Image (cartoon, rainbow, N blue to C red):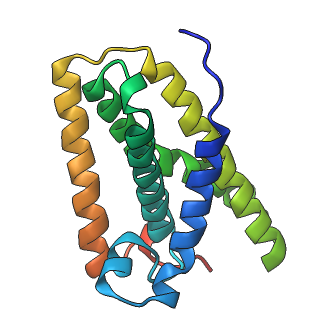
Amino acid sequence: MSKTKFRWWKFIAVWICFLLLHFSYETFPSLFFRIIAEANETVFFHMKMLFVAYVAVSFVEFVIRHTLIKSTSNFFASRALIAVAFPWLTITFWFLAWALNIQFPLVWELIYANIMIMVGIYLALRMEELFDDMEFRPALKWMILLVFVAAVFVYVAFSLNPPMHFFTTPPV
């Protein structure tokens, strides 16, 4: 693995994009923002915003750095895999407080949530460093594409018609 400089710009961009998405539907209620942002305070919608923020910033990264990228297909495969996994990993961090039965006052809950989001983004960007030096086999690239398309379908479908479920019910 080659030594790469940590992309702080991307860390900040994903976090800011997430925060903007968090308040976008409330500010601009529309079908577009219902699909890409948060229509209510649920774990599912937070995962979707993490997914959208990471995908959007990765697309901007590609536009900016496309001449420096060794393999376009590997770039998109790695970013798609991280986009699908990163929200789950971040929410795993966030659930740690629940698992330990720690209850925060609202201000501390917001601080904790943002710290967990930053930890998740940091993990995603460190995974990028690893994946940038790997070449995925064609079969794996197809599987990544399949799971990415499934994630997009689930996020869109459940944004329009959320099921009654643990991840779509606001936490108490």
| Number of numbered discs | 0
- Identity of the residue drawn at 44% across and 33% down: 65
| Residue toward you, 74 or 147 | 74
Image position of 97 with respect to 106: above or below: above
- Identity of the residue drawn at 83% across and 69% down: 108
Q: Is residue 92 visible?
A: yes
Task: Tell me where residue 20 sits by quadrant.
Answer: bottom right
| Residue toward you, 69 or 82 | 69
Residue 158 x, y percent position in the rendering: 29, 72
Residue 117 x, y percent position in the rendering: 64, 54
Residue 14 x, y percent position in the rendering: 56, 53
Task: Tell me where residue 144 sits by quadrant.
Answer: top left
Where, quadrant-wise, is the C terminus in this rendering?
A: bottom right
| Residue toward you, 17 or 126 | 17
- Identity of the residue drawn at 58% across and 44% down: 10
- Left or right: residue 117 compared with residue 49: right
Residue 138 x, y percent position in the rendering: 17, 20
Q: Is residue 163 visible?
A: no
- Left or right: residue 4 compared with residue 111: left
- Identity of the residue drawn at 20% across and 33% down: 143
Image position of 60 with respect to 3: above or below: below
| Residue toward you, 73 or 127 | 73
